[in-house]
Image (cartoon, rainbow, N blue to C red):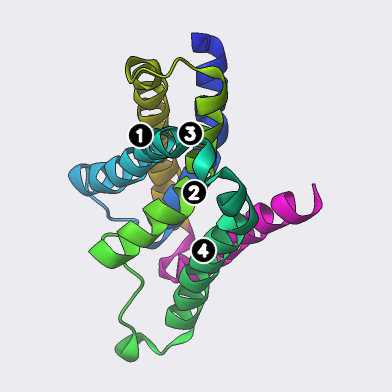
Amino acid sequence: MEVLTLLLLAFGLSFDSFAVSVSSGLILPGIRFYKACIIAFSLAFFQALMPMLGWFAGLTVRDELAHIDHWIAFGLLALLGIKMIIESLKAEEHRNGFNPLKPSVLLTMSLATSIDALIVGISFAFFQKPDTTAIILPVIIIGGVTFIVSMLGILFGKKAGTRLGKRMEMLGGFILIAIGLKILIEHLWM
């Protein structure tokens, strides 16, 4: 696969990570650079890992995953989004806050945004050489682009969150639910 095609694919796969990163920046307007790197690295790591896993799985699970991947992504993102909305509605003294840096939340966000990359990896098995070197360049490009796009999303969200106030958690929740719905609609009706 050509590098330009891989770059376009990587940008397409990173849109969900960008939106999640914007949400993270919105609710953590004071986030430090190294913590933003933790979020971006987690999103990029799973975005790069999933095509590799999909490639190794190949044709054996393609049909089964195609029927449920959108439901898994929708469910995970909707649950995260609902939790964020509920937390944003609680009185300030009773709020735990939705924290994208919490390991369980970060893992869920990373998995939910990378399910499509797993399917892309399965499709790679159709048209790439069967040796493991064929998957290395796509994995590096997908991971690198996702990291950069995620950092930009966090920066954008941070700037908007600082200007718009502390209650941006609700907006972040709606964004996550919207991403989940987008994934579901794309797979069910397109």
User: Does label 1 or label 2 sit earlier along the sequence?
Assistant: 2
Is residue 118 visible in the rendered structure shown here?
A: yes
Q: Amino acid at mark 1?
A: Phe
Q: Is there a contact, CB below 8 Å, between mark 4 and mark 2?
A: no
**CA–CA distance in space, label 4 to label 3:** 21 Å
Where is mark 3, residue-wise? 121
Q: Amino acid at mark 3?
A: Gly
Of the pair 178 and 167, the residue shown nearer to us: 178
Residue 112 sits above or below residue 2 on the image: below
As helix, strand or loop, the secondary structure at mark 1 comes to: helix
**CA–CA distance in space, label 1 to label 3:** 18 Å
User: Does label 2 or label 3 sit earlier along the sequence?
Assistant: 2
Q: Residue at x 54, y 44 (%)?
A: 116
Of the pair 173 and 164, the residue shown nearer to us: 173
As helix, strand or loop, the secondary structure at mark 4 comes to: helix
Where is mark 2, residue-wise? 115
User: Does label 4 or label 2 sit earlier along the sequence?
Assistant: 4
User: Does label 1 or label 4 sit earlier along the sequence?
Assistant: 4
Where is mark 4, residue-wise? 77
Q: Nearer the viewer, mark 4 or mark 3?
A: 3
Q: Residue at x 40, y 57 (%)?
A: 109
Where is mark 1, residue-wise? 147
Q: Is residue 120 left or right of residue 158?
A: right
On the image, the x and y values in percent for residue 142 come to 42, 28
Q: Residue at x 67, y 54 (%)?
A: 182
Residue 73 sits above or below residue 170 on the image: above
Q: Which residues are magenta?
A: 164-190
Q: Nearer the viewer, mark 1 or mark 4?
A: 4
As helix, strand or loop, the secondary structure at mark 2 comes to: helix
Q: Residue at x 36, y 17 (%)?
A: 131
